[in-house]
Image (cartoon, helix red, strand yellow):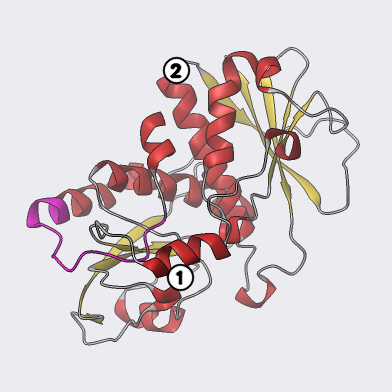
Amino acid sequence: MIDTMQKRQSIRTYDTKNISESDFTKIKEYIKKDENFKGPFGYQGRVELVQVTNYVTDKGIKLGTYGFIKNQKGYLVGLAENHKDSLLDFAYCFQKLVLYLTDLEIGTCWMGGTFNRNSFEQEISIQKGEFIPCITPIGYPNEKQRVFDKVARMVVKADNKKAWDKLFYDTDFTAPLTKEKAGELEIPIEMVRLGPSASNKQPWRLVLSEDRKVVHFYIEHTPNYSSKLGYDMQLLDIGIAMCQFDIACQELRMDGEWFKEEPVMLLPNENVEYMVSWKTR
């Protein structure tokens, strides 16, 4: 999965060929298992599949080309409660789904704001207390990436990830963390850096404890970034970061657990907020 995380990219242009029945079956089997959408805090989210033919669903609802998405063969629609821990859990699980699809060579693109929620609400059954935090189109990536895809990646700076010294810190926020000082946690932390985020803002900030056994996850909010959407979309980015980190640790056979206990630490600015911590067992 570390290799999968390194190679995964957002796909906006898909091949015109349909997703095979075999792959659709695998997707349906994955999303119907409740345990695949229960995150570290125990909140239960879910995902529904909406198949699309020529941008029209089976119910005849036109879903358009949101975010300039082309030739998508369907959407996976996320459903969760609208509060902090539920959104962290949901994004953690949704990123696992995205990586599962990447392994199947099915393309995805996280979308949290650039789509019409009302159209999807007509297509699926929304239960009390749920809302749609995000969706992803699905389809096989176009072998010849369109010029627009490359331009889109440039616009969101998708290939321009922040350096370690802008994201990760040693003991407190006054000292940047180097790869050498990260020790055995270097790869899991690097997987956080490589993760997708809304507009490539990369709002995660990690602080590694002095004994190298605890990693504290913070968010640096972009003020008013998603206020019009009615939820804090950047919380999804932290859930993604947690997923990337956790999967890498599991693959490297590093046993750990999530917990919440904010350390006493001077924060660099008013936009930085503590989220969660991970410690080795």
Q: Decide if residue 214 is on the left or right side of residue 127.
A: right
Q: Residue 232: which quarter of the image?
A: bottom right
Q: Decide if residue 161 is on the left or right side of residue 196.
A: right
| Crowd tier of the residue under label 2, counting other residues whose Cα lies within 10 Å: few below 14, some 14–19, many 20 or above | some
Q: Residue 72: which quarter of the image?
A: bottom left
Indicate the position of residue 7 as horizontal and vertical percent values.
Answer: 39, 40
- Does residue 143 show up magenta in the picture? no
Indicate the position of residue 152 as horizontal and vertical percent values.
Answer: 49, 66
Q: Which residue is mark 2?
A: 252
| Above or below: residue 92 compared with residue 158 | above
Q: Is residue 133 visible?
A: no
Considering only order in the chain, which callout, 2 or 1, is on the residue closer to the N terminus? 1
Q: Is residue 110 visible?
A: yes
Residue type (three-letter) at the residue carrying disc 1: Lys
| Of the pair 96 and 87, the residue shown nearer to us | 96
Q: Which corner quadrant holds the C terminus?
A: top right
Q: Which residue is mark 1?
A: 128
Indicate the position of residue 4 as horizontal and vertical percent values.
Answer: 36, 36
Q: Residue 2: which quarter of the image?
A: top left
Please tell me whether mark 2 sits on a helix, a strand or a loop. Answer: loop
Magenta residues, start to end: 10-25
Residue type (three-letter) at the residue carrying disc 2: Leu
| Above or below: residue 235 compared with residue 206 | below
| Of the pair 274 and 10, the residue shown nearer to us | 10
Residues under labels 1 and 2: Cα distance? 40 Å
Q: Residue at x 63, y 14 (%)?
A: 183
